[in-house]
Amino acid sequence: MTSAQLIPSKDAVEAAIARVLDAEHAARDAVVDAVDAAAAMTEAARSAARALATRTERRIGAVRAAFEERATAEVAAFDARAAETSRERPLTPDELARVDAAAAALAAALTGSGC
């Protein structure tokens, strides 16, 4: 084979260049499409994250509100019970007798007498 036979024809060279340019154009289009798809996926992920954050804040708010309501009710119940138990009331005759007996027993224990 001679060197003249190894050189491609002008038409073959032009066709090869056209194929390369077409492939380059297709590759650029594919890159643009990939960038657009990546941007869309990024925005979708950000949107999902924002929605999740909103739901989470709403749930946390509901839990806090329920806790505050329950704590307020329990504190009110404690306050009511404290007010009820701290009110002075006269002792019943039976309670007075028990106090007297306890005082006598304490006095006897402290003085050593067997009253």
Image (cartoon, helix red, strand yellow):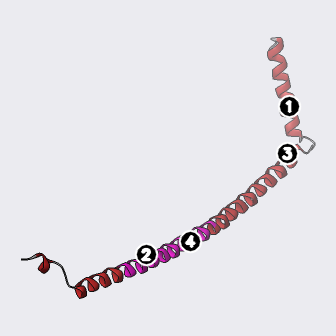
Tell me the quarter of the picture where residue 70 sits: bottom right
81 over 32 or under it: above or below: above
User: Mark 3 or 4 closer to N-term?
Assistant: 4
Q: Are marks 2 and 4 in contact (CB under 8 Å)?
A: no
The amino acid on which the numbered mark 2 sits, given as a three-letter code, is Val
Name the residue beneath numbered marker 4.
48
Q: Earlier in the sequence, mark 2 or mark 4?
A: 2
Secondary structure under the numbered disc 2 in the rendered image? helix
From the viewer's perspective, tell me whether residue 69 is left or right of residue 20: right
Q: Which residue is mark 3?
A: 85
Which residue: 66% across, 62% down? Answer: 60
Q: Which is more foreground, mark 3 or mark 4?
A: 4
- In the rendered structure, find residue 31 and report the number of the disc placed on it: 2
Task: Tell me which amino acid carries mark 3.
Answer: Thr
SS type, badge 3: helix
Q: Residue at x 24, y 88 (%)?
A: 11
Which of the two labelled residues, at mark 1 and mark 3, occupies the earlier sequence position? Answer: 3
| CA distance separating discs 3 and 4 | 55 Å
| Sequence-wise first label, 4 or 1 | 4
Precedes in sequence: disc 2 or disc 3: 2
- Dot 2, crowdedness within 10 Å: few (<14), some or many (≥20)? few
Tell me what residue is drawn at x 67 percent, y 67 percent. Answer: 58
Q: Amino acid at mark 1?
A: Val
Label 2 – label 1 distance at C-alpha:
95 Å
- The answer for how far apart the CA atoms under marks 1 and 3 are is 18 Å
**Is residue 52 rendered magenta in the image?**
yes
Q: Which mark is residue 99?
A: 1
Cα separation, mark 2 vs mark 3, equals: 79 Å
> Which residue is rendered at x = 70% and y = 59% of the image?
64
Q: Residues within 10 Å of mark 1 (few under 14, many from 20)?
A: few
Marks 2 and 4 sit apart, C-alpha to C-alpha, by 25 Å
Residue 74, x across and y down, in percent: 76, 54
